[in-house]
Structures are given as C-alpha cells and as structure tokens.
Image: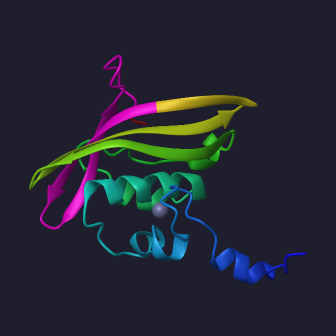
Amino acid sequence: MAKKHPSSKKALDALCPCESGKSYKTCCEPYHLGLLAPTAEVLMRSRYTAYTLGLAPYLLQTWHPDTRPLTLNLSEDQAIKWLGLQVKQATTSETTATVNFIARYKVGGKAERLHELSQFVRIENAWYYLHGTDPRTDSDTSY
Ligand SMILES: [Zn+2]
C-alpha cells in the first residue's frame, strides 16, 4: 500500500492548473507574485491559472490598458469550473505574440470548450493580453 503524503506536502506539490506538468510553485506562482512573464505563452498560462484561482487583480494587471475592463468580478463566474488548458500554438515577435489555445470548463454541469486565439503586446519588458477571438469564427472571446 502506498504511503500517503501529509496534506500540506500534497498542497506544495500540487500540479499547476495550466497543465504544464510542473508544480504551481515552480510554474505560474512566481508570476502571480510579481515576476514578469518572459513570453506571451507563459503569461497566457499564468492568466489561465489566475482564472482558476480567482486572482482578478493579476488578470487586470496583465491586461492591456486599452482593452482592460474597469473591474473583473470573478465571483460572478463561480458557476464556471475550469478543467484544463491545452496550448495549440504560440507565435511571437519582439513586441507582439499570439497564443492559440483550448480551455476546458464546466458550467451548470455541462462540459464546454473555449477555443481562443489571444493577442499579446509587449510594452518595455512586460507582456500584456490585448484581446481574443475564436479562430474558427473570428468572434470576440475576450471577457
Ligand atoms: Zn502554470
């Protein structure tokens, strides 16, 4: 029979919600604590994780000032349970980047998928989320 880890150890080793395969501590947490994400893909992952953890201030802070909502009330979205993330493709230049991903979630007991092509811009050393569209329909998916 496998020996059980104490729950505190288990929490420290918890896998990051962004499904990188790394622990939260070594994956998205440093960015939530203020480290600048080195690439748009890393920022996108950390923003997905922020949604799963309800970190509204981080989401606002990493949103481009031109498209950033005034407030973000994630408690209104409590019906959404985020299930996982799959990054399909990421492209980047010096100052702009795109990340194509599928996020899985459950709402009202129903499994859904958000397919988004996110646009990012780099200002000085920081990447910002600009907006997102559904790559299949081109409709706006950012919220
Ligand atoms: Zn992560």
Against 109, residue 25 (above or below) is below
Q: Position of residue 6 (x, y in %)?
A: 81, 83
In the displayed structure image, the side of residue 97 where residue 36 appears, left or right: right
Which residue is outermost to the top? 137
Tell me what residue is drawn at x 23 percent, y 58 percent: 127
Q: Position of residue 64 (x, y in %)?
A: 26, 50
Against 116, residue 89 (above or below) is below
Which residue is outermost to the front? 1
Q: Quadrant of the C terminus?
A: top left
Q: Position of residue 34 (x, y in %)?
A: 37, 75
Q: Position of residue 29 (x, y in %)?
A: 48, 72
| Magenta-colored span | 115-141
What number of labels is visible? 0
Q: Main secondary structure of the magenta part?
A: strand
Q: Can residue 70 be seen in the rendering of this structure?
A: yes
Q: Quadrant of residue 108?
A: top right
Tell whether position 127 is magenta.
Answer: yes
Query: In this orientation, which residue lies closer to the viewer: 11 or 108?
Result: 11
Q: Quadrant of the N terminus?
A: bottom right
Query: In this orientation, which residue lies closer to the viewer: 5 or 39?
Result: 5
In the displayed structure image, the side of residue 100 where residue 30 appears, left or right: right
Tell me what residue is drawn at x 40 percent, y 30 percent: 141
Tell me what residue is drawn at x 43 percent, y 59 percent: 46
Tell whether position 53 is magenta.
Answer: no
Q: Quadrant of residue 13?
A: bottom right
In the displayed structure image, the side of residue 93 where residue 15 appears, left or right: right
Against 35, residue 70 (above or below) is above
